[in-house]
Image: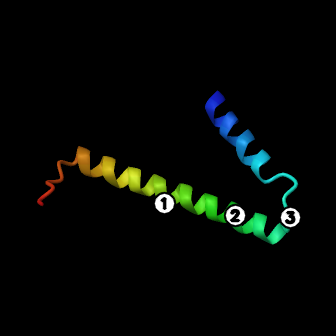
Amino acid sequence: MGTLLHFKNLYVQAFSNCKPEIVVLLLKVYSVFCALMLSMAIYAFIYRVFTGFDYYF
């Protein structure tokens, strides 16, 4: 749990006292979007590993 709090603290500090506000908002939305895409990629990889998906190259 301490790791999540540490990441939250880093996230909040990264955007404190930044101007202009619209850029900060766009960066926050983009960071959430990247986190969602990364979690979907990890989920898809783990799903294919556990369901026995055959990788044919």
- Give me the C-alpha separation between circle 3 and circle 1: 27 Å
Q: Name the one closer to the observer, 22 or 5.
A: 22
Q: In percent of the image, x 63 and y 64: which residue is there?
A: 30
Disc 1 and disc 2: Cα gap in Å?
15 Å
Q: Tell me whether the residue at label 1 lies in contact with that at label 2, contact meaning CB atoms closer than 8 angstroms.
A: no
With 34 as the anchor, is 2 left or right in this view? Answer: right
Residue linked to disc 2: 27
Q: Are marks 3 and 1 in contact (CB under 8 Å)?
A: no
Q: Are marks 2 and 3 in contact (CB under 8 Å)?
A: no
Check disc 3 and give the amino acid type.
Answer: Lys
Q: Is residue 25 positioned above or below 1 on the image?
A: below
Disc 1 residue type? Met
Q: Nearer the viewer, mark 1 or mark 2?
A: 2
Q: Is residue 1 among what the camera can see?
A: no
Task: Specify the amino acid type for callout 2.
Answer: Leu
Residue 45 location (% of width, % of height): 32, 51
Which quadrant is home to the C terminus?
bottom left
Give above or below for 47 relative to 57.
above
> Where residue 10 sits in the image (x, y, percent)?
72, 42
Q: Quadrant of residue 21?
A: bottom right
Q: Which image quadrant is residue 28 in?
A: bottom right
Percent of width and height locating residue 36: 53, 58
Give the residue at mark 3: 19
* Residue bearing the label numbered 1: 37
